[in-house]
Every structure is written in structure tokens, then in C-alpha cells.
Amino acid sequence: MPNGQIMKALSGFYYVRSEGNLYPCKGRGNFRKKKVTPLVGDYVTFETDVNDEGYILGVQERRNELIRPPIANVDQAIVVASVVEPEFKTFLLDRFLVLVESKSIQPIIVFTKTDLASEQQMDQMEQYKRDYEALGYVVIMGSVKVEQNMEMIIPHLRGKTSVVAGQSGVGKSSLLNALHPSLAIETNDISKSLGRGKHTTRHVELIELEEGLVADTPGFSSLELHDIELETLRDYFPELKHYGEQCKFRGCMHHKEPKCAVKEAVASGLISAYRYNNYMQFYEDIQNRKPRY
């Protein structure tokens, strides 16, 4: 019985790559009973008929999975944020970072549309770049119109399964087109009335790119922190995890507790105030969310 990996899901078919070939497959009815839905990125067992069409029989255990976009077994996320159009917001970037790190996915930050930014905006973005690099993140900044900028991403793709994520309109599809022009992925301009981009990618597909696999995905329609608990949120902020080891109380949430080393680090400028404020906003979001039944 052959094994393979799902490379694309479209119109009820799962396209499974095995030994260099691509097989259109459908899921057996038993998946519905088991409440298992195959995802792009899944490693599966399948069978084929004389027409090289087949059925997926089993899904191997996943390392991780995302809901939006629906994909499994991701190594890293290229988190794209534009300097302008739409305007850069640390709140959104940090939310993406928390979401991907909660799935044990390594993030790489890419700031785009530098060619549209003013000198003042670029000075601010250079500071943000330094801030996030100091936390251990890889940060790449540039424009898809400058080939050398995008080449800096290539070494990070090799041997990895990557997902491209970010707010709608930041240039995810444009970035992939710049890396691999033959893709010719459709892109749209920012909607002037909404102030955000239109979704241009209609399905999830793993694309072979620079000796790795990359999924072009729709902009997240939801950034809810449904799967993250209050007790684990602090673990997805590297600086909070570092200074939190010095807090007086074990299990300190860095909120109202006395003698909190994290709050002291914020007060002394060792932790960026905007990062701590974003943490507290996420904390309140999780604390106030309605229970799911």
C-alpha cells in the first residue's frame, strides 16, 4: 500500500505526491466516522485504481495543524507584515507570532513594501527590526520589487515546509511570485473602502520552491486565540519567558502579582512596552472569551 503526502486539496480531491507522481484521491467514508479530515501536508496511505485515481485510507499522526489555513506538519511560518498599505501594527504581528509559536512552528518575520514608505516610517521599522531580532527572530525587510531583498529568504526555505501568513493585503502572493515568477499567483490591490486587501488565494497548495515546500495561503480571516490558555500565553513571548524566571512567585502571570521581574524589566526599558501591552491585551482576550461547548 503506497504512502505519500497531500500537496493540494481542491473540489473534494486530495492530490497525493508519491515517488515523484501526483495522484488525485478522495477520502474514504470512514474518515467522517473518525472525525478526521485530511489536510494539505498530511502524510497518508492510499490506494489507486487503473486510472491512477485513488482513495486515502489512513492519515499518519501530525506534528501540528492549523485551521486557517487548513494545513498540517508545518516547520516554519513566513509571517509577512507590510510597512504601509496596510499600515504596520505590532499588535497584529505579535498575534501571528503567538499563534504560530503555540503550534511549535518557527516564525520568520518579513517586512514588505519598503519602497512605499517614508524616511520616518523606515526609521521606525528599522527600530522594530532591531527589537524583534534581539528576541531571537529572523527579520527580513525589503520590497518584492527588489530581487536582492527576496533572495535573503531563500536559504530559510531549503528542507522546510513553510506557510506564508499575514494580514490580507500585505503582499504574501506577491512575495511568492517574486521568489518563483512562474507561479503567477493572482494578486489584488488594497480595497480603498475597507483599508485591507482582498483574498486572492482560493485553496491551499504545497509548492516546491528552492528545495523546500511552501504553501500560499489566504490571509487569516480569524486571529482568535481559541487554543491558547492563560497559563501558556507567556511562553510565546521570549522576553517574558526569560525575565519570568526571576519573578518571586512561581507561575507569575506578570499581571497584578508583586515583585514581578517582567514588570520591572518593562519599567526599566529592558522589555519593550508595546510588547508587554500586546501581551496584556491577549491576556484579557483569553480571560474574557466565552467557553466553548
Image (cartoon, rainbow, N blue to C red):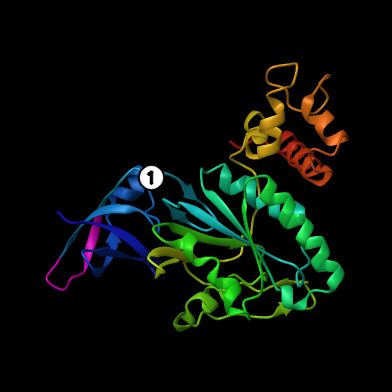
The structure residue drawn at horizontal position 57% and vertical position 72%, both measured from the top left corner, is 150
Q: Main secondary structure of the magenta part?
A: loop
Please tell me how many numbered marks the rendered image carries: 1
Query: Which quadrant holds the N terminus?
Result: bottom left
Q: Position of residue 173 (x, y in %)?
A: 56, 74
Give yes or no for residue 119 being in the magenta stretch.
no
36 horizontally vs 192: left or right: left
Kindly identify the amino acid type of the residue bearing the numbered disc 1. Answer: Arg
265 horizontally vs 70: left or right: right
Residue situated in front as seen by the camera: 274 or 201: 274
138 horizontally vs 191: left or right: left
| Relative height, residue 43 to residue 278 (above, below) | below
The structure residue drawn at horizontal position 79% and vertical position 78%, both measured from the top left corner, is 192
Residue situated in front as seen by the camera: 106 or 291: 106
Identify the residue under disc 1. 62
Tell me the crowding category of disc 1: few under 14, some 14 to 19, or many 20 or more residues within 10 angstroms, Cα based. few
**Residue 64 lies in quadrant:** top left
The structure residue drawn at horizontal position 41% and vertical position 50%, both measured from the top left corner, is 73
**Residue 77 lies in quadrant:** bottom right
Q: Position of residue 264 (x, y in %)?
A: 84, 29
Query: Which quadrant holds the C terminus?
Result: top right
User: Which residues are drawn in magenta?
Assistant: 49-56
